[in-house]
Amino acid sequence: MAKAKQAQKTQKMPSFACDYTLLVPVLLLVGIGVAMIYSASCEIALKQFGNEYYFFKKQLIFAGFGIMVMLLIRFFPYRIYRPLTYLFLAAAIILLSAVLVNGVGQTAGGATRWLRLKGVSFQPTEFAKLALIIFMAYSLTKKQDRIEELNIGFLPHVLILSLLSVLIIFQPDFGSIVFMWMLAWFVMFAGRVRILHLAGAFFLVLPVAAYLIANSAYRLKRLLIFLDPWRYPLDEGYQIIHSLMAFGSGGLLGKGFGQGYQKLFYLPAPHTDFIFSVIGEEGGWLWVLIVLILYLIILWRGIGIARSRPDFFGSLLALGITVSIALQAVVNMGVNLSLLPTKGLTLPFLSYGGTSLMINMVLVGILMNIGASRAEK
């Protein structure tokens, strides 16, 4: 009898054994990212701040703190996010609105996308992605009985997406809007929203996207540059051309760590949006393949966790997290290889930036908890 009670108790307790299949590739990507940020940014940091370790030290602090947060979040039961859904959503809306207030939002590179508190910059759009994933998982789960109805399963989610998009478009950050809509479409599809509604809305959104591109000179030029970057070699096509040159000169094995040429004030933002190009030049296609494999392992493990969950909320939450990381990686790498129009999206775990790294580490922590709780009923 005692053994039976002990076995029953053990079954009810979630297993928090470390998920090395998920943890190891994340830690490897973070480690590669910290090293490559030093290589990509040392000359820029030396010129701007007189300290070649400026970006490296900051990212090292972000990475250390992020790992601790990930391991801590891993112990919080993922079900606690259900009652906190609308609190997360409200916080995202307030933060996105605060960015637009004069004197509150911080402008850099012609865009106002950051809040600065006591010397620390924070990008609310990254938090909005987290809030959106939790909201979509919660709302779609709650409405499963009537999910095929247009005004229940589809319109409420589109309205929330539209609200977030309106706040983000004034920053402006068109790339994040496209990313969030793509992410939401994936989750709604998995959440059993009618294909007819998703497909119909897609054709309705296209004219809106076309209007936003046609009525913005820089967006239109980005599209033209994507089609033919060599037509603007000294203008907006400059960064794409030098990104491709980095990959081409890297060859199979690369030039060696720290030996890259394009990062020396030729390739804009080499430690942020275009760090993948620096990896391609210094590590060659070998390290490009290694990075791809690490992302594929995360994708494979995330899908496995999503499929193993007995509850729909946990399954959708795991899927949303996995798609978010994988989709952002695909978009960034596609831009670096000139396979997609230029977007200001970082490469998860690799690019410089505290907000992006911290949010992604939180997402992995949640995903690890979902995987560790899969034995629960």
Image (cartoon, helix red, strand yellow):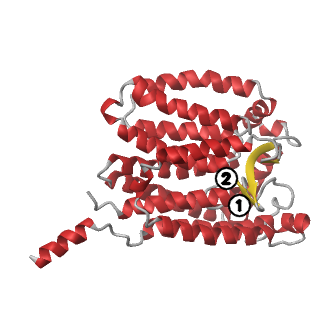
From what the image shows, is residue 212 above or below residue 247? above
Mark before the other along the chain sequence, 1 or 2:
2
Residue drawn at the location 50% of the way across and 48% of the way down: 323
> Do the residues bearing badges 1 and 2 touch, measured as CB atoms within 8 Å?
yes
Quadrant placement of the C terminus: bottom left
Which residue appears farthest toward the left when viewing the image?
1
Residue 61: in sight, yes or no?
A: yes
Viewer-closest of 91 and 206 = 91
- Residue type indicated by callout 2: Thr
Q: Position of residue 128 (x, y in %)?
A: 59, 46
Mark 1 surroundings within 10 Å by alpha-carbon count, few (fewer than 14), some (14 through 19), many (20 or more) = many
Residue in the image at 60% along x and 24% along y? 206
User: Position of 235 compared to 80: left or right?
Assistant: right
Q: How many marks?
A: 2
Callout 1, which amino acid? Answer: Tyr
Which label was assigned to residue 352? 1
- The answer to which of 25 and 45 lies nearer the viewer is 45
Q: Quadrant of residue 7?
A: bottom left
On the image, numbered disc 2 is attached to which residue? Answer: 346
Residue at the image point whose x is 81% and y is 42% from the top:
102
